[in-house]
Amino acid sequence: MINTLKLGVSGINLGKSSKNESIDFKAVRREFEMLKNVGGEVDELIFTDCVLGEELPMNLIQRGLKLYPSIEEMKKIREIAEEMKVKVGGHASFLVNFASSSEKVKRASRGHLTALCRRMEAAGGIYAVTHLGFLGEKSEDELKDEIAMEIERIISKIEIQLLIENSGKRKGVGSLPFIIDLAEKTGVKICLDWAHLHAYGRGTIRNSEDVRRIINEIEKRLGEFEDWVPVMHISGIKYGFGGELEHLGLNESDLPWYDIIKVLNEIGVNSIIICESPKRWNGDLKLLKKAILGEKVEIKKLGQRSILDWIEKY
């Protein structure tokens, strides 16, 4: 078995409280060093709380929102990444919402993705990933053409690879069939979040066969898995009737994360897997690296009972 998965981490939040505030480049360097020390290769920089503009009004500061770093600051991050031999990706603002009925919101969403992609290009980044938004009055089926048009518009203006992430919340736009349809229609690639997929299905991934079924579903429609899914996310997850509630440590939920890694290894998937566990720096990155290398790891069966178990029982 050849281990070809590349380990990465959901990394440092690069938002700023004001335009004059400087990015903490020492903290960036420390994070890259920690990542290298556990055998990681990719740092997914976080822009999830970022808003567009030159200054933050008090109401946005109170909401914990931030400004984007400058292009020059991203060029400095590129220097550090190249020196440390770390690749970087970027996660878009959670304010992106192409499902909105408001043209103002959709225009701002284009701005957010363009702002992220320009900064990732300056940082020498290898990808940018985004969610699509939340369902309102329209269903996913009703939204598919207009969202495809928005994604095609963005792709035509950027050089970096844009990835669409599946939703963990059932009110979010991003079921697996929708994401596959979007990829087929526009050519955009997928960031497959295994924990989100599990939560969206209320406990749908139970064993290795379920993992293979999902991979086959993607390959049947699109082609080679790693060609269409160059990046994946993984963590434990808590979920309810509406899907995702919160991310958990790898061994704190009923997601069979080790089976996922085992199947990916058996197939020989040459993609990046980003650890989004809240305990990533407290053992989960090392645990994930051991699994990627095929080493024995302790698997604890903790977390909630799958809704599928309840259905089978009653």
Image: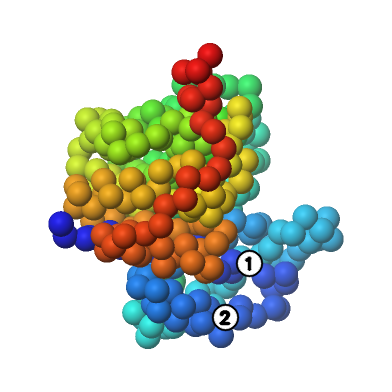
Whether residue 116 is visible: no
- Please tell me which residue is depicted at 62% across the width and 41% down the height of the picture: 245
- Please tell me which residue is depicted at 69% across the width and 63% down the height of the picture: 66
Q: Which numbered circle lies on residue 70? A: none
Q: Is residue 214 above or below residue 63?
A: above
Q: Residue furthest top?
A: 314
Gap in angstroms between the C-alphas marked 2 and 1: 13 Å
Q: Which numbered circle lies on residue 15? A: 1
Rendered location of residue 76, percent (x, y): 48, 81
Rendered location of residue 181, percent (x, y): 35, 30
267 horizontally vs 107: left or right: left
- The kind of residue tagged 1 is Gly
Rendered location of residue 184, percent (x, y): 30, 33
Whether residue 221 is visible: yes
N-terminal label among 2 and 1 = 1
Q: Which residue is mark 2?
A: 27
Secondary element under disc 2, as helix, strand or loop, is helix
Q: Where does the N terminus fall, quadrant-wise?
A: bottom left
- Please tell me which residue is depicted at 16% across the width and 60% down the height of the picture: 2
Residue 35 vs residue 108, the one in the foreground: 35
Q: Is residue 117 above or below residue 146?
A: below
103 horizontally vs 42: left or right: right
Q: Residue furthest right?
A: 58
Instruction: Count numbered badges in the picture.
Output: 2
**Mark 2 or 1, closer to the camera:** 2
- Please tell me which residue is depicted at 47% across the width and 50% down the height of the picture: 300
* Crowd around label 1: few <14 · some 14–19 · many ≥20 (10 Å): many
- The kind of residue tagged 2 is Ala
User: Residue 159's quadrant in the figure?
Assistant: bottom left
Rendered location of residue 218, percent (x, y): 28, 35
